[in-house]
Image (cartoon, rainbow, N blue to C red):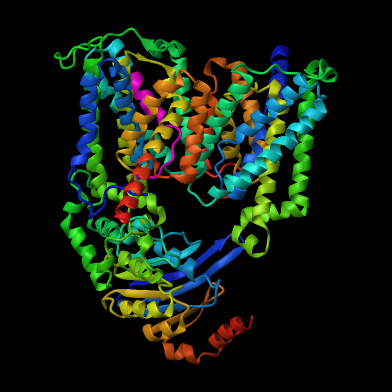
């Protein structure tokens, strides 16, 4: 059985700066996998390589066993790989439902249609509304995204990715910057995601990580330090040093 | 053969003189675009203002040439700093479209003002007596004024290079071009840095406009007519560097002069085609950093 | 900014949208001596509409849209001189030529962004200008191209000296183009363009072929610009180099911004107000006119980003809140 997503010897240099070094990584089908590490460990760069935004300097990326290293972002999305962004990357002046519908329409292959009004594509509108409903955003569907609270914007971020019906979902700090009152809601949403989606999450909130993930990989200075179950990670001395070291610094 | 050689020398000489003027005018544009990310299409206005100021000071008030030049530099630099503080700075975070529209608006206003004050015709050019005549070198004669232009501009470019590479101000400019947020968190007062740099860039443009009045005629349509060339220098050279616009300005000055000398029937056709080719090959310009 | 379109927008034509057409017909009867100005305004509305499609919806900033307008204008002129005086043939040829140029140049320049893109649009217009300037045998060079006569449209409607046919001809073409643009704006394609303008990177991340989509909209826009150019040639029976000039592109942007970018009817209001004012003021006070235009641009950018229609919208909103 192929992993949902796998990297082999993945490297990335920006000039003399190495941000990813020989990363071997497996995301199993249906996994709840967290990627943690101190700031500057190369987590977001790793996600950017997985999603196809950056090309790796060397190494391979396999999506369900298929080598996608040379493919662009669009082709990877077509193969079921979706991501969210750490800093909100939404269509700020569009309505909430349009934000999701843009993604649904691309996936459904109707985004090129020029003659019938968008509203006539009921299946796109209905699916987008249904997604908003599962995330509890029905009330906000007609508002502009810029009018939403930050926590709700983070939910829209997830809704857009779900609109692509991914098999692999990369979540880049879904709860970053969200007040505690709203982060609970985000965790509920994450818990309710369909089981068949393999999820890789980057997160700084360790409570969230240990409640959500069944497997954790620790990245430090562009290298995999250790991978294991939450219990193994929690017991590891080196991980403690890194996190404690960071706090002291 | 002799003829060809001497025309080659001539084209190179006049091309370099033209290129140096383009450099003086455009370097400020390149730095401000790289530093502040502001698409200032109205940069040519400062060059035109410098030209008008110098020429009217010399003809109307009998101000001596060196003083008129310095005066143009100082006056335009100060005026542009006021503009930057009160208008430009409000649009740093606005979109590219707003910046383009705003600066096109400034061009329209300045073109109208110039026509109102000076009339539609090009201004007569004054060259001081001691810079008239020819300098003989290697068997050919060169106009003394243009020799002065080249020497002066090269000296200025050297000074500028020194300023950016070797002074604290230069270090701050470079740091801010490369890492805006980091510079701010280091406590660099970017607002003041922007104003000063903007003033210096506009002052240099005024110098270029004043010194180059003999090459690029000073007339109301100036900021529109030559905008394409200033932008070509900046785009081809690459944003935010000193070397980029210098090399680009020289290349364009010489190439344009050569085209107009040997194939005048094609006008600026080849310059545009070459620009398109360069930008397709390197969208960030010859010396720009890839983003 | 408020944009039409999207997945929940009602795409049916509202009553108020018939207003411009009623007004245009009213002008036809009420102001017969201004019909040639009217034709010019209708032509520029079409041109502004084409720009709005890529600037307002695609977010592409171009200083070179006159390249396509001029191409359409010259091709229509050349067809009339060398091939046939049938207006519709010239019109289609002009639009087609501009569309092909838009496709080819769009494929080249839309790979870049920012300053390079701005510069490339300028350079392409400049190249077209130089070509038209030098290809004297075909284009008449600096003297322009004129002295051709047109046959009646479809053999039925003869161009009259009062400009009545010309006016209605422009109106019909504009109406058809408006209908098409409106369809596009409300379609999924139009919605995806809004997405590209709002957030190009995110659009990539949802699997949208952004580049192809921009090239497609650029081509459509160029075709419409060419249509406008061809109309100008046919209604004035002359085409000159200024149809390709950078100045025209600048003026076009001014008109669109004045009306309101990214709203279909901004392209209607802007040229109307601008050209009527120009006709009235520019000849008498040219300096003040240009100064006023510049000042207006600066003020719009600083205080009223939505243009005239934006101001009206804000006014209506305020009234509603009060009541």
Left or right: A27 with respect to B280?
Answer: left
How far across and down, in percent of the image, does residue B131 sit? 82, 20
Q: Quadrant of the C terminus of chain C?
A: bottom left
Q: Residue at x 57, y 17 (%)?
A: B263
Q: Is residue B139 visible?
A: no
Residue C172 point in image, percent of width and height: 20, 26
Q: Please tell me which residue is depicted at 45% across the width and 64% down the height of the picture.
A: A48
Q: Is residue C124 left or right of residue C39?
A: right
Farthest residue in the right direction? B130
Highlighted magenta segment, given as a residue range: C57-75
Depth check: give the residue in front, C74 or A223. Answer: C74
Q: Is residue C73 magenta?
A: yes
Choose top left, top right, bottom left or bottom right for residue B205: top right
The magenta stretch spans residue A72: no
Is residue A14 visible to us here? yes
Q: Is residue A185 above or below residue C158?
A: below
Nearest to the observer: residue B225 or residue A35: B225
């Amino acid at each position: 059985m192929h992993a949902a997503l796998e990297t082999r010897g993945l490297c990335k240099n920006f000039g003399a700066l190495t941000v990813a070094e020989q990363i071997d990584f497996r995301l199993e089908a249906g996994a709840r996998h967290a990627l943690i590490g101190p700031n500057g460990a190369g987590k977001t760069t790793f996600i950017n390589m997985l999603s196809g935004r950056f090309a790796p300097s060397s190494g391979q990326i396999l999506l369900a066993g298929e080598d996608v290293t040379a493919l662009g972002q669009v082709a990877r999305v077509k193969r079921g790989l979706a991501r969210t962004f750490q800093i909100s990357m939404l269509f700020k002046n569009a309505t909430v439902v349009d934000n999701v519908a843009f993604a649904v329409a691309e996936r459904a292959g109707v985004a090129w249609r020029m003659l019938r009004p968008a509203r006539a594509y009921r299946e796109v509108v209905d699916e987008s509304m249904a997604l908003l409903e599962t995330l509890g955003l029905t009330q906000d569907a007609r508002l502009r995204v810029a009018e939403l609270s930050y926590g709700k914007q983070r939910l829209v971020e997830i809704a857009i990715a779900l609109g692509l019906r991914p098999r692999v979902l990369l979540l880049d700090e879904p709860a970053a910057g969200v007040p505690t009152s709203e982060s609970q809601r985000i965790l509920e949403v994450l818990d309710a995601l369909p089981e068949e989606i393999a999820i890789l999450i980057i997160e700084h909130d360790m409570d969230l990580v240990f409640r959500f993930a069944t497997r954790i990989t620790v990245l430090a200075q562009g290298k995999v330090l250790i991978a294991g179950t939450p219990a193994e990670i929690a017991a590891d001395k080196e991980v403690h040093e890194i996190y404690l070291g960071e706090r002291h610094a | 053969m002799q003829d060809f050689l001497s025309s080659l020398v001539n084209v190179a000489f006049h091309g370099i003189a033209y290129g140096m003027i383009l450099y003086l005018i455009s370097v400020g544009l390149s730095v401000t675009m790289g530093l502040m990310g502001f698409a200032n299409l109205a940069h040519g206005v400062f060059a035109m203002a410098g030209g008008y100021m110098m020429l009217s000071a010399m003809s109307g008030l009998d101000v001596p040439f060196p003083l008129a030049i310095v005066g143009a530099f100082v006056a335009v630099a100060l005026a542009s700093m006021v503009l930057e503080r009160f208008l430009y700075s409000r649009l740093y975070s606005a979109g590219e479209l707003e910046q383009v529209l705003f600066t096109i608006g400034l061009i329209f206003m300045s073109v109208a003002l110039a026509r109102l004050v000076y009339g539609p015709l090009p201004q007569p050019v004054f060259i001081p007596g001691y810079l008239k005549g020819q300098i003989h070198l290697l068997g050919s004669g060169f106009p003394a004024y243009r020799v002065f232009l080249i020497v002066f501009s090269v000296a200025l470019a050297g000074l500028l290079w020194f300023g950016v590479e070797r002074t604290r101000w230069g270090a701050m400019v470079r740091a801010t071009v490369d890492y805006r947020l980091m510079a701010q968190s280091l406590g660099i007062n970017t607002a003041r840095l922007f104003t000063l740099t903007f003033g210096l860039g506009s002052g240099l443009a005024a110098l270029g406009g004043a010194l180059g009045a003999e090459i690029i005629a000073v007339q109301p349509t100036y900021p529109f007519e030559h905008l394409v060339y200033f932008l070509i220098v900046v785009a081809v050279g690459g944003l935010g560097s000193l070397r980029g616009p210098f090399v680009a300005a020289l290349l364009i000055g010489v190439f344009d002069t050569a085209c107009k000398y040997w194939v005048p029937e094609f006008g600026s056709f080849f310059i545009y085609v070459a620009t398109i080719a360069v930008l397709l090959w390197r969208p960030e310009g010859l010396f720009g950093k890839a983003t | 900014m408020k944009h039409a379109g999207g997945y929940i927008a009602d795409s049916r034509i509202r009553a108020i949208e018939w207003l411009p057409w009623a007004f245009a017909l009213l002008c036809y009867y009420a102001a017969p001596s201004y019909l040639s100005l009217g034709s010019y305004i209708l032509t520029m509305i079409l041109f502004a509409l084409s720009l709005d499609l890529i600037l307002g919806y695609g977010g592409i900033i171009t200083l070179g849209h006159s390249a396509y307008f001029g191409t359409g204008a010259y091709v229509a002129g050349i067809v009339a001189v060398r091939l046939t005086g049938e207006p519709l043939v010239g019109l289609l040829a002009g639009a087609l030529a501009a569309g092909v140029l838009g496709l080819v140049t769009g494929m080249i320049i839309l790979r870049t962004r920012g300053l390079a893109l701005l510069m490339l649009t300028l350079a392409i217009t400049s190249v077209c200008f130089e070509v038209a300037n030098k290809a004297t045998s075909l284009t008449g060079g600096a003297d322009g191209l004129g002295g051709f006569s047109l046959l009646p449209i479809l053999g039925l409607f003869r161009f009259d000296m009062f400009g009545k046919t010309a006016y209605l001809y422009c109106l019909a073409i504009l109406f058809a183009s408006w209908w098409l643009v409106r369809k596009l704006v409300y379609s999924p394609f139009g919605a995806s363009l809004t997405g590209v303008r709002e957030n190009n990177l995110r659009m990539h991340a949802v699997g949208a072929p952004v580049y192809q989509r921009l090239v497609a909209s650029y081509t459509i826009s160029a075709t419409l610009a060419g249509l406008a150019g061809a109309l100008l040639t046919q209604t004035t029976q002359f085409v000159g180099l200024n149809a390709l000039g950078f100045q025209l592109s600048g003026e076009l942007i001014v008109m669109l911004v004045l009306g309101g970018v990214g709203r279909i009817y901004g392209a209607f209001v802007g040229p109307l107000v601008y050209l009527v004012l120009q006709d009235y003021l520019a000849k008498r006070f040219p300096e003040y006119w240009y100064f006023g235009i510049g000042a207006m641009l600066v003020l719009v950018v600083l205080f009223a980003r939505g243009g005239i229609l934006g101001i009206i919208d804000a006014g209506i909103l305020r009234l509603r809140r009060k009541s």
